[in-house]
Amino acid sequence: MSNCHNCGAENLAALVNCSACGTTTPPADLPDDISQIWRIRFDLIEKAGGPGLPMRQQLSFGEHFRMTWNIWAFLFGPLYFLVKGMWRKALVYWLLGFVPLMLIDLASPDSELGPLKFGVNIAAAAWCMLCSNTDYYRKLVLKDNGWW
């Protein structure tokens, strides 16, 4: 929690704008070098009720898109999590994507199941894309860096 320097209202740590007066205030608990894009994403996650996103229906389509979609996580998957310092999740997501592909290769080594492998790859990439922003929020704001 941090207090607004303009009106003194108490705000959640990730808010970019004060919830009472709307003044732009840098969150106290976030690193100074975090970009404005991440601050906006964290603000939207707070607006949606935190990392569980219980109030996500209150967001517009554009806000929901900006809050949940991360193209870099889609393109690089577990490597993106590794770069962001979430190595436990990177390892688990890599295993969850790798094991089904190995099982498909064992079931059909002559590539009959190529479309299934493609589908598994897309599903794994989409999962990383949709989870990355809230996972990074948990790491920076809630100081929770993984499952164990």
Image (cartoon, rainbow, N blue to C red):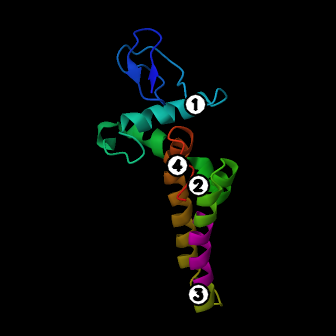
Badge 1 crowding class, 10 Å Cα cut-off, few under 14, some 14 to 19, many 20 or more, is: few
Q: Is residue 108 visible?
A: no
**Is 67 contained in the magenta span?**
no
Q: Which mark is residue 30?
A: 1
Nearest-to-viewer mark from 1 and 3: 1
Nearest-to-viewer mark from 2 and 1: 1
Q: Quick one: label 2 or label 1, which is nearer the N terminus?
A: 1
Q: Quick one: label 4 or label 3, which is nearer the N terminus?
A: 3
User: Where is 62 relative to 32, above or below?
Assistant: below
User: Where is 27 relative to 79, above or below?
Assistant: above
Q: Amino acid at mark 3?
A: Glu
Mark 2 in CB contact with mark 1 (< 8 angstroms)? no
User: In terms of image quadrants, where is residue 53?
Assistant: top left
Identify the residue under disc 4.
135
The answer for how far apart the CA atoms under marks 4 and 3 are is 36 Å
The answer for how far apart the CA atoms under marks 1 and 4 are is 15 Å
Q: Residue furthest front?
A: 148
Q: Is residue 26 visible?
A: yes
Q: Which mark is residue 74?
A: 2
Task: Look at the image and tell me in which quarter the N terminus lies.
Answer: top left
User: Where is 43 relative to 87, above or below?
Assistant: above
What's the residue at 37%, 34% (across, down)?
47
Q: Residue furthest top?
A: 6
What's the residue at 62%, 73% (across, down)?
98
Q: Residue 76 versus residue 89: which sits nearer the camera?
A: 89
The answer for how far apart the CA atoms under marks 3 and 2 are is 26 Å
**Number of numbered callouts drawn:** 4
Residue span colored magenta: 93-103
Q: Amino acid at mark 1?
A: Leu
Identify the residue under disc 3.
112
